[in-house]
Image (cartoon, rainbow, N blue to C red):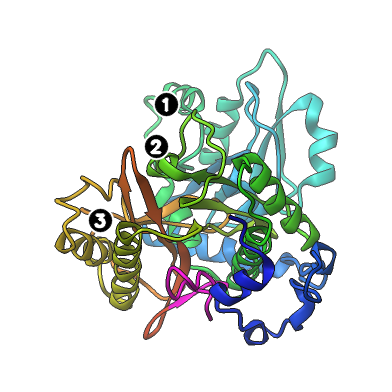
């Protein structure tokens, strides 16, 4: 069967006004497709400005002082973008910055790239260069001596050849290498109001894109065809986004399978994907049934939804990350789909921000306590190989008194995948 627009409006629990979107944003007059009604929701988004990055650098400096760290080495990755608003490709040539407690970052750059670097570096004017036959690590040693530093933290994504070359260069100097993740993650795990606004919008856009694409379901459709509809809807709303849909028994593979299955009546559709707004990510999964669900499909779906709700109810500052995983897992185990990871084979959730998966994680053994401003996915699932899988995923932020979902449009039931 085909889910037409009238039927999908009925099952999706649409209350578009809750987001301040005109009713014709997604669906036009009865009997006509209206993807053209989707419009750019990002055109008025205000990007981060210089003061935002200075606040991040100030916070990093505070953490470095608390941990007695004198320098923090960052190379061309997301941490450099986060703290220094700087993108640089990663190659075999060392390029990076040493953030410090004394002032602006100090840069290490291949000499032939200096003019290009000066065009794009926005923080710090001290750029120390090395010729092709010279060692950039000797420059870093000199920077640490100039800072009178004894402890150099290394960003978590700095590659091993750089770390080992530094270790060799610093041997016998009294300068030690320590992990930089307590600084980088200590800053990035707490989101500002502006960051949360980006993530709210990104999650909202992804959910609208799914809702739009689901009106186009047809028997015989391939996953890539549904994915193309979702990508197009994201693009019409101003983002580059996508998904990987799984149909029928392939939905039991949490991250997909090489099997390509066309859509048939009675199939579970498990759809996972996202987009970004100002580099801040969404991550959303919805599970629906194409046609009439079986009793088992309904029972498993209801159990997963109950688990997601139990996890969200447990969210509040001061509770441990592992306790949120446990809240959801207990529901699934008590429902007969345990023990442990037997059917719910992955952790409950991951941190999210500039990266789709980032620190911290909602998983057994993580006794980190939640703080307001932390953001996570909440994505319980049950996967029965040879039959089907069900997963529901929404991102949330920890608030002073609990938690709040990002992007709204939370699943109400199997018949209402996008309620308010």
Dot label at residue 366: 3
> Secondary structure under badge 1?
helix
Sequence order check: which comes first, mark 2 or mark 3?
2
Give the residue pinned by disc 2: 177
Please name which of the two marks, 3 or 1, marks the residue nearer to the observer.
Answer: 3
In this picture, which residue range is highlighted in magenta? 404-420
In the image, what residue occupies the spot 53% across and 72% down?
Answer: 406
Q: Is residue 244 left or right of residue 357?
A: right
Query: Does the stretch in magenta take in 407?
Result: yes
Q: Do the residues labelled 1 and 2 touch (CB within 8 Å)?
A: yes
What is the CA distance from the residue labelled 3 to the residue labelled 1? Answer: 30 Å
What is the CA distance from the residue labelled 1 to the residue labelled 2? Answer: 7 Å
Estimate how packed mark 3 is, as few (under 14), some (14 to 19) or many (20 or more) residues with alpha carbons within 10 Å.
Answer: some
Q: Is residue 114 left or right of residue 351?
A: right
Q: In this view, does 119 lie to the left or right of 298?
A: right
The vertical placement of 176 against 124, above or below, is: above
Sequence order check: which comes first, mark 1 or mark 2?
1
Query: Does the stretch in magenta take in 316?
Result: no
In the image, what residue occupies the spot 77% across and 63% down?
Answer: 237
Dot label at residue 167: 1
Can you give x and y, in whole percent of width and height, for residue 403 in the image? 40, 78
Nearer the observer, 72 or 197: 197
In the image, what residue occupies the spot 73% across and 65% down?
Answer: 50
């Amino acid at each position: 069967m085909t889910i037409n627009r009238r039927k999908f409006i009925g099952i999706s629990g649409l209350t578009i006004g809750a987001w301040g979107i005109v009713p014709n944003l997604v669906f036009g007059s009865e009997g006509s497709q209206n993807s053209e009604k989707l419009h750019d929701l990002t055109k008025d988004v205000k990007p981060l400005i210089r003061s935002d990055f200075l606040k991040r650098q100030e916070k990093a400096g505070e953490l470095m002082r608390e941990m007695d760290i004198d320098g923090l080495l960052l190379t061309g990755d997301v941490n450099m973008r986060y703290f220094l608003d700087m993108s640089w490709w990663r190659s075999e040539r060392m390029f990076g910055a040493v953030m410090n407690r004394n002032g602006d970052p100090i840069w290490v750059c291949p000499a032939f790239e200096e003019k290009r670097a000066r065009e794009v570096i926005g923080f710090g004017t001290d750029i120390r260069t090395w010729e092709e036959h010279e060692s950039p690590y000797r420059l870093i040693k000199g920077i640490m001596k100039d800072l009178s530093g004894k402890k150099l933290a290394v960003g978590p994504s700095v590659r091993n050849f750089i770390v080992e070359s530094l270790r060799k260069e610093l041997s016998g100097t009294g300068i030690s290498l320590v992990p930089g993740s307590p600084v980088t993650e200590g800053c990035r795990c707490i989101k500002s109001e502006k960051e949360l606004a980006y993530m709210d919008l990104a999650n909202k856009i992804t959910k609208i894109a799914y809702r739009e694409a689901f009106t186009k379901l047809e028997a015989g459709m391939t996953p890539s065809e549904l994915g193309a509809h979702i990508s197009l809807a994201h693009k019409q709303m101003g983002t580059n986004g996508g998904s990987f849909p799984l149909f029928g028994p392939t939905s039991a593979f949490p991250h997909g399978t090489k099997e390509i299955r066309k859509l048939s009546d009675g199939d579970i559709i498990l759809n996972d994907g996202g987009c970004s707004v100002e580099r801040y990510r969404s991550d959303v999964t919805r599970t629906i049934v194409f046609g009439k669900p079986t009793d088992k499909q309904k029972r498993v779906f209801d159990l997963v939804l109950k688990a997601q709700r139990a996890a969200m109810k447990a969210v509040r500052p001061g509770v441990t990350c592992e306790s949120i995983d446990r809240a959801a897992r207990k529901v699934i185990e008590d429902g007969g789909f345990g023990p442990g990871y037997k059917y719910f084979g992955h952790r409950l959730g991951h941190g999210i921000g500039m990266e789709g998966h980032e620190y911290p994680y909602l998983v057994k053994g993580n006794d980190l306590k939640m703080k307001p401003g932390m953001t996570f996915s909440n994505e319980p699932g049950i996967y029965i190989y040879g039959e089907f899988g069900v997963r529901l995923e929404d991102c949330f932020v920890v608030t002073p008194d609990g938690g709040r979902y990002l992007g709204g449009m939370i699943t109400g039931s199997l018949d209402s995948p996008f309620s308010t």
